[in-house]
Structure formats: structure tokens, C-alpha cells
Amino acid sequence: MVFWLLAGVLCLQVPPQEFWPAGFVAFSLPGALVLNFFFLLYWVLSRSWLFVLPLTVLLLGWNYYARLLAINFEQEPPKGAKALQVLSFNTHMFNAYLGQTPKEAEAAKEMIEWIAEHPADVYCLQEFYSKRHSNLYNTISKIGVRYNKHRFFSVANVDREKGDIGVAIFSIYPIIEKGVINFNKSSANRVIWTDLDVKGDTVRIYAAHLQSMSIKSEDIENTYSAIGNEESFKKEGRNLARRLRNGFVARGEQVNMLLEHVRESPYRAIVCGDFNDIPFSYTYNELAEVMENAFVKAGTGIGATYNGPLPFLRIDNQFYTSGLRAVGFETHHEMGLSDHYPISATYVVEPRTEEAR
């Protein structure tokens, strides 16, 4: 178990595009962490000195346990502090492709209204969908224009109904500058960024949508149903493994491009979105090495954000650089109409020192 843990931690440092099997070893790390905890309980209850080994592993690897489970007390921004609340949400195109039944239309309307009326200062929306001449899906108008929000929408695709699909940022604060990080011509995934004037301080906001895992619920169901049929199970297992491998490799390249841009930013930054990778991945690890994670610093519990057949997955995150401090984090499980749950975080914009000015 200890060797498994060590291998998993080492594989977090390995770019999957250079050695893709490392992605699978890192992906299994939560199993080793949970097993170590049960070993600790077992040896303590057995009154054996061997409890020292799993206890030592737990203490040395506490930062990795914190990625699994956050324990923080509720905080409030200090009186007079400059606070900024950011909402991130993969809207799943407001379920526009699930059918135009009255039930689906009502769900889309509810989702759009929930976002439009959320008290966050900034919205970062992935798989955003807007159709100008639609009473239901004219989301730019319903979320941005109606509430006088500044906005930036980068369109990745246009569907047959002339609806736009992409990544969007809405803000109550003025947008000074904006841009797009395109990964490659064939990919709809991208990162957009805006520099916001937050009461005299410039804060750069990134809204990221990295390569999908491309695993549908039927893929998982097919794999489970194939258990007992060796040939069918191998076929479905290889299919899942191939999709995971392709995702590991693509996201490894994409996060490097994103971090290169973040490092060159002259402003403090918040990087949020759908990263399509768990906290035990090269993608997450690279981001966590240069930034703090808002859930780890201010959240509570497991914080699962994927609303699908695989439970306990946290694949949506908010990271931030120095000069900011997370004082609140929430996973909005009450909004379960997308295949992702929204997340919001409240930040204190720390006063700049004279040297920084």
C-alpha cells in the first residue's frame, strides 16, 4: 500500500503526453489513501505498534488527504475588505439537445433564471449556449443585457439552429482587456480571460473548459453489464481506457498552455472552470503547485461537482494566485439540472503593498 501511494504521488508529476500510463496510476491514488486510513484504524484497534506506519503516511501525505476532504470553518470577509464572489458552472448548453418537451423547456428556463439571479459578481460559464432569436435560449440577453452585466462570449461552434456554443464570462465590473487561449483548430475546448476593474484593482479571471473525459453513462453501464462475459468486458474496458488515456494526454498539454499564460499575467488571477480531471491528476497537480485551491482553503466536505453516474468526482475547481484569499466556498447541489453542479467562491482582494504598486 505504501509503495502504491509513493507510485501515485510520483506519477502526479509526470506529464501524460510523455508517459500516459502515469495518468492511470495517479487516477488510482484515492484508493491508496482510503486504504491507508483503514489500515490505521485496524492497527489502532488491534493495539499494534504497526499503526505508526499508516499514521506516518497520513501525516506526511496530509496535503493529498485535503484534496479528498476539506474541513474549514465558515468565514466572513473582514469589515471594509474588498470582496469578490465568482460563480463557475458548466451549463451543459442548458440541456438544449435533450429535447424540446415542456419539461425540458421548463428546466432550461429555471437554470437560466437561477444563474441570472445569483448574487455573484462574476459568472464563468462553460458549454454556454445562446440563440439570439429564441424566446427561451436568448441567454446573452437574459443573463447579461437584462442585468447590465459586462460580458465576453467566445464561440467555439454554431449549431444547425444557429445557436452559439462556447465559454462566457459575465461581470458587474468593467472589462479592461480580454482574450482567448485556443488549444488547437480541431478542439472546441478553450480558455477565455478578462481583466476586470474591481474597485480600482485589476483582477484577471480565467474561465477554462479543458478536454472532456468523453465517457457517457451508457459506457459505464455497458462495462458493468459486461462483467461475466470476458470478451465483452475486455472490449468495453479497452474502450474506457482509451478514452481516459486520450483525455489525460490532451489535458496535460492544455494545462501547460494555460499555466504559461497565468505566469505571464501582470495581475492577480482566478482560474476557474470545468477541468475534467480529479484532484489526483497531472492537470490538478500542476495548477495546485502555483496556485491555491478555493475548495481546499474554504470549502467543506467532499465537494463533488459531477452530477452523473460516477459519484464523488470533483472536476470543477477555482484556483487563485497570491494577493487574493478565499474566505468562502459552496457547491450548489440545489441546482441539479446540468451534469455539473455550480460552484461559487468568495475572495478578499488583499491591499497592495507600496512595493507592488
Image: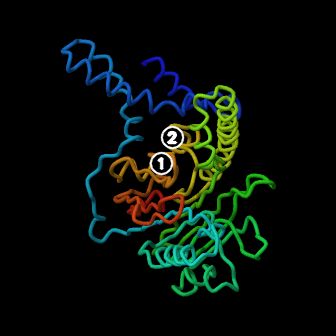
Disc 2 designates what residue? 289
Residue 224, relative to residue 108: is it above or below? above
What residue sits 73% from the left and 58% below the top? 188
Q: Amino acid at mark 1?
A: Arg
Label 1, label 2: how far apart the Cα atoms are: 18 Å
Q: Residue at x 40, y 29 (%)?
A: 33
Q: Quadrant of residue 246?
A: top right
Q: Nearer the viewer, residue 54 or 93?
A: 93
Q: Nearer the viewer, mark 1 or mark 2?
A: 1
Which residue, as the protein is rendered here, is positioned at the far right? 185
Q: Are marks 1 and 2 in contact (CB under 8 Å)?
A: no
Q: Disc 1 or 2, which lies upstream in sequence?
A: 2
User: Position of 183 compared to 118: left or right?
Assistant: right
- Point out residue 122 in the picture as x, y percentages from the top left corner: 50, 70
- Counting from the top left corner in percent of width and height, residue 234 is at 67, 29
Q: Residue at x 69, y 68 (%)?
A: 165
The residue indicated by pointer 1 is 314
Label 2 amino acid?
Answer: Glu
In the rendered structure, the answer to whether residue 340 lies left or right of residue 132 reads left
Decide: few, some or many residues near mark 2? Use Cα within 10 Å; few <14, some 14-19, many ≥20: few
Residue 257 picture location, percent across and down? 68, 48
